[in-house]
Image (cartoon, rainbow, N blue to C red):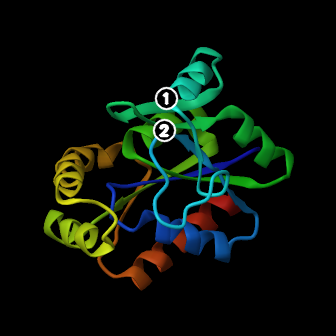
Amino acid sequence: MNKVIIFSAPSGSGKTTLVKHCLQQFPQLQFSVSATTRALRGEEIHGKDYFFLSVEAFKKLISENAFVEYEEVYHDKFYGTLKSEVERIWNEGKVVIFDVDVKGGISLKKYFGEQALSIFIMPPSIEELERRLVSRATDDAETIRTRVGKASEEMTFKDQFDKIVVNNDLDEAKTSVEQLLKNFLSA
């Protein structure tokens, strides 16, 4: 059976760090590159971190039913999972690992059902989440306020995931997700 692993969390919870850790620990995993209409940040690379698309190109792919799931997270800020990306990974005999927003994670779990393990990464608190976003220094104050507000809402969806991992201590969170993946992959 083809399997997928879904990581979702409010922005700044540490999910990308945990996904990168899993990719190092489990050679059978292959990262699913999402498509987005947002601008590149820092050192990001098209086709590696995201497929960076124009709003028009993204909407054209929606009309062609090219996505497993997609969301308009903010106005004209779309994120989505291309069917072609999932098929490419499965054709290589790998397990797909997703790093997606909360609504995307719920949609992916509904789409893949028992083929999927969905993991929600919880920040220890909203205050800690805000501190992490500020220290990341990639967003302006207004964007951080928006993200913190969105995080409060997103945390209300945590029970729609198979597992919840609180990222209070990164080493403990790494150990927790490793065990979850070992159990799922060996089943």
Under mark 1, the amino acid is Val
Tell me the quadrant of the picture where the C terminus can be found: bottom right
Identify residue for label 2.
Answer: 37
- Residue 101, placed above or below residue 144: above
In the image: residue 70, left or right of residue 121: right
Q: Quadrant of residue 66?
A: top right
| Residue 19 locus on image (x, y percent) | 54, 65
Tell me the quadrant of the picture where the N terminus can be found: top right
* Nearer to us in this view, 78 or 70: 78
- Residue 158, placed above or below residue 37: below
In the image: residue 33, left or right of residue 130: right
If you read the primary sequence from the N terminus, does the residue marked by circle 1 or circle 2 appear first?
A: 2
* Nearer to us in this view, 38 or 64: 38
Circle on res. 55: 1
**Image label count:** 2
In the image: residue 153, left or right of residue 18: left
In the image: residue 54, left or right of residue 144: right
Dot 2: few (<14), some (14–19), or many (≥20) neighbours within 10 Å? many
